[in-house]
């Protein structure tokens, strides 16, 4: 009886541990440090197989906030950086961590809010005015508060609105210190407004009647960039394959793949690479 | 503390000379001014006794007088605070300990089969191969547990467990066997079986040191008697002499069923 | 409530259809966690037994340390392992970051103190029972530890299960050192975190139900094995 049980466990163990380990099966891979907005929206699921099909290179995406992605890449833990915070990206290159930066695509931010719209911002097209109105009302605002690209873009807009959110933090301004999805979940729980990129919002599944309140301001422009991590600084970087990925993303093939990705029938990322080979 | 009210000082003055006169078999174990303190209290107080080869020494006294402690000191399980234990004239060391074995009031059985308990003890004591197998079989026979060899030791009855414990102790061929109230929680049938094992061991030449509060058992099994009170040896002698005509007030009180509350030590 | 029922339905659906992605994730979860628990047992059982059974200077301090390490936050462990395995870190050249191996290392660190501390407690109790007999037989330290571990083996299965529970439910460490890379380092808990952040709460909860089911199966299997083995042993 005991022996049979043991045998059963052994069989189960073989079944579990005998399976092929992808990390060892596929040696040809690169790690891309990227953001939740690109990954969770499903973009990568769409475009990466196309790239792998063409080159045989598997792309492993670590999807975190832009701030953390940049830090990880600065530690050399990644071959390519694919994020959305141009200032931080330029700094990354200037510090020698990256070879060069190129624009890939853009989308836009939006402000979402509860159906009751307590601040009365629905339909506004001026982000700064809308934010001022939220600040002046009793409404809550949920911020990422995590140094992500979205967080930094949001802070830029608050500065332009002349609102000191640091002073308001903890009262009507709530910093979640979490990813976009977690922040949206929190915002919805609180009945708070929040700023989010359109792709994440469209693919977000827990909307609870929340709607897009503010959109269309040019300042909502959200540019994504791609950078090969500098192999001179980080010798473990797979520069050749990484460069292949960067080149492909910027190529007409890659740009077409990005443009063809649709959520709910709508294009959510707009390719704008300048050097089209 | 020195104002002792004992009729006989520790040790009994006459005993050592008397036993030395009587053909004097080898002194296996002796203690010199043995003391043990714990928690600031002296629990064993200047004990000097001799244990001679081939004798059966009964250690008696009321609960808490230090019988168990004395056995543990003799066996080297705990180090004395002062004084020493000599094994064949020399300080007790590993070699000496190897010639000793002990059985506890509540038998300590490993969570294994009866035979595995024997095997463990024998292996620890360095018995291997066929020698060990022979000794295992002998011990099982001795304890009359052949049919229960594969049974978990802990599911055996209390009497069976104690028989196994005695057999296990004897399987390592000790020269001296300490037993700490081995039958205190056993029924008469089991007690008889354990006593029979002790008699057989003695017949095989094993020296016996047994702590008991059972007067009948002391009469049945003992040659010599060491009577303790409050950490001291207050009386020693032949079992029958002490039990029939106790000289110390402590022994007399105890045998008469009186509570003797003096604890001047 | 309705969404909870929907989740249950979804969970059943996921299991019944044998969704290949889900199976891959479950397989990796089990592989990472069971390997980590096995490694933690190899390390933690002897440590716990030594601290529990032997006397040595600093023993009580060692016990306190083990007990404290039981409360290690997974994120802190993840951070430590990340810094060690990061390209610039001391173990960077091994290239283990963002691999299942990194997750196994992190979970091993997380689980070992639990195994060691609980083992210490069990062995200590058993040793209190055995101590005089061991002293009388003059059992050496090595034999003591081996004998105690062997005799406590059925209780120690529960220890391994406690470690399994901690590891399989943990997300902070594996997401940091594994990166939650699809098809590479995505396990049950990181998938739940991912689906939650996507706002797919029903799916996340369904996965939670699946995780709970797996934990139940593993616990049930071990306890059945334990009971069977104990019955055979004590028959």
Image (cartoon, coloured by chain):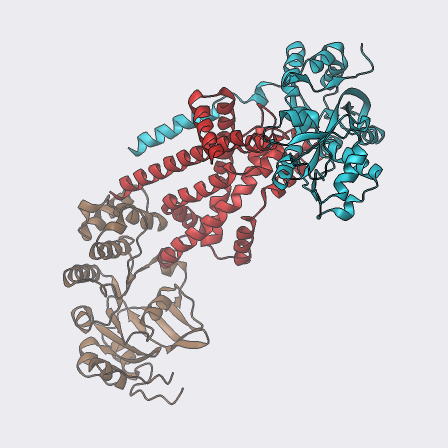
Front-lying residue, C220 or A14:
C220
B70 lies left or right of C189:
left
Asked where in the image residue A37 lies, by quadrant, the reply is top right
Q: Is residue C106 above or below residue A225?
A: below
Asked where in the image residue B263 lies, by quadrant, the reply is bottom left
* Residue B31, x across and y down, in percent: 37, 73
What hue does chain C carry in this figure? red
Front-lying residue, C107 or A121:
A121
Which one of the lettered chains is coloured cyan? A
Residue at 55% from the left image edge and 34% from the top image edge: C104
**Residue found farthest to the left:** B189
Front-lying residue, B171 or C15:
C15
B3 lies left or right of C35:
left
Asked where in the image residue B159 lies, by quadrant, the reply is bottom left
* Residue C117, x across and y down, in percent: 49, 50
Q: Is residue C2 above or below residue A52?
A: below
* Residue C13, x across and y down, in percent: 44, 24
A233 lies left or right of C91:
right
- Residue A75 in view in this figure: no
A252 lies left or right of C64:
right
How many dots with numbers?
0
Q: Quadrant of the C terminus of chain C?
A: top left
Front-lying residue, B229 or A223:
A223
- Residue A129 in view in this figure: yes
Residue at 28% from the left image edge and 41% from the top image edge: C231
What hue does chain B carry in this figure? brown
Q: Is residue B158 above or below residue B57?
A: above
* Residue B181, x across and y down, in percent: 26, 66
Residue at 46% from the left image edge and 49% from the top image edge: C118
């Amino acid at each position: 009886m005991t022996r049979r049980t043991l045998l059963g466990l052994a069989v189960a163990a073989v079944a579990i541990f005998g399976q092929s380990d992808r990390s060892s099966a596929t040696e040809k891979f690169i790690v891309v440090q990227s953001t939740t907005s690109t990954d969770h929206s499903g973009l990568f699921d769409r475009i990466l197989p196309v790239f792998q099909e063409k080159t045989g290179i598997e792309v492993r995406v670590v999807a975190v906030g832009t701030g953390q992605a940049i830090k990880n890449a600065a530690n050399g833990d990644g071959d390519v950086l694919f994020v959305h915070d141009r200032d931080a990206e330029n700094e990354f290159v200037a510090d020698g961590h990256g070879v060069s930066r190129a624009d890939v695509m853009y989308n836009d931010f939006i402000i979402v809010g509860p159906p009751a719209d307590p601040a009365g911002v629905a339909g506004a097209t001026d982000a700064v005015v809308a934010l001022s109105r939220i600040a002046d009302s009793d409404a809550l605002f949920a911020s990422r508060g995590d140094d992500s690209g979205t967080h930094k873009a949001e802070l830029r807009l608050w500065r332009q609105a002349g609102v000191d959110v640091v002073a308001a933090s903890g009262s009507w301004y709530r910093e979640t210190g979490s990813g976009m999805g977690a922040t949206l979940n929190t915002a919805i729980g609180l009945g708070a407004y929040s700023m989010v990129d359109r792709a994440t919002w469209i693919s977000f599944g827990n909307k609870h009647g929340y709607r897009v309140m503010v959109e269309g301001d040019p300042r909502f422009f959200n540019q994504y960039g791609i950078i090969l991590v500098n192999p001179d600084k980080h010798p473990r970087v797979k520069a050749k394959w990484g460069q292949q990925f960067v080149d492909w993303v910027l190529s007409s093939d890659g740009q077409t793949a990005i443009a063809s990705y649709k959520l709910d029938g709508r294009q959510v990322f707009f390719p704008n690479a300048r050097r089209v080979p | 503390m020195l104002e002792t009210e004992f009729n006989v000082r520790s040790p009994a003055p006459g005993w050592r000379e008397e036993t030395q006169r009587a053909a004097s078999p080898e002194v296996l174990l002796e203690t010199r001014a043995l003391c043990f303190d714990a928690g600031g209290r002296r629990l064993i107080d200047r004990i000097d006794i001799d244990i001679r080869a081939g004798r059966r020494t009964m250690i008696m006294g009321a609960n808490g007088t230090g019988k168990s402690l004395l056995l543990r000191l003799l066996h080297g399980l705990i180090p004395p605070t002062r004084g020493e234990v000599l094994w064949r004239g020399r300080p007790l060391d590993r070699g000496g300990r190897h010639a000793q074995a002990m059985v506890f009031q509540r038998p300590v059985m490993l969570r294994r089969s009866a035979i595995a308990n024997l095997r463990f003890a024998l292996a620890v004591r360095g018995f291997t191969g066929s020698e060990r197998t022979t000794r295992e079989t002998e011990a099982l026979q001795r304890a009359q547990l052949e049919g229960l060899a594969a049974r978990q030791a802990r599911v055996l009855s209390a009497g069976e467990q104690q028989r196994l414990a005695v057999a296990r102790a004897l399987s390592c061929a000790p020269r001296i066997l300490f037993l700490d109230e081995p039958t205190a929680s056993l029924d008469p049938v089991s007690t008889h079986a354990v006593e029979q094992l002790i008699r057989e061991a003695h017949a095989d030449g094993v020296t016996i040191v047994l702590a008991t509060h059972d007067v009948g058992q002391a009469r049945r099994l003992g040659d010599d008697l060491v009577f303790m009170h409050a950490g001291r040896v207050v009386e020693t002698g032949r079992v029958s002499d002490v039990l029939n005509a106790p000289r110390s007030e402590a022994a007399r009180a105890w045998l008469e069923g009186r509570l003797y509350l003096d604890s001047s030590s | 409530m309705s969404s909870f029922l929907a989740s249950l339905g979804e969970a059943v659906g996921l299991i019944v259809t044998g969704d290949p992605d889900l199976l891959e994730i479950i397989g990796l979860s089990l592989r990472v966690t069971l390997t980590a628990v096995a490694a933690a047992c190899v390390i933690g059982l002897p440590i716990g037994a030594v601290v529990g059974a032997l006397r040595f200077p600093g023993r009580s301090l060692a016990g306190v340390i083990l007990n404290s390490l039981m409360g290690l936050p997974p994120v802190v462990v993840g951070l430590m392992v990340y810094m060690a395995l990061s390209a610039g870190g001391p173990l960077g050249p091994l290239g283990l970051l963002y691999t299942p191996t990194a997750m196994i290392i992190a979970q091993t660190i997380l689980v070992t103190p639990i195994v060691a501390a609980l083992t210490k407690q069990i062995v200590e109790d058993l040793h209190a029972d055995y101590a005089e007999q061991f002293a009388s037989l003059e059992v050496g330290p090595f034999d003591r530890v081996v004998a105690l571990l062997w005799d406590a083996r059925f209780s120690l299965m529960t220890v391994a299960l406690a470690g399994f529970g901690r590891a399989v439910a943990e997300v902070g460490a594996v997401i940091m050192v594994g990166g939650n890379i699809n098809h590479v380092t995505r396990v049950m808990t990181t998938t739940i975190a991912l689906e939650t952040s996507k706002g797919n709460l029903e799916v996340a909860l369904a996965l939670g139900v699946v995780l709970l089911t797996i934990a139940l199966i593993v616990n049930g299997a071990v306890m059945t094995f334990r009971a069977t083995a104990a019955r055979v042993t004590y028959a």
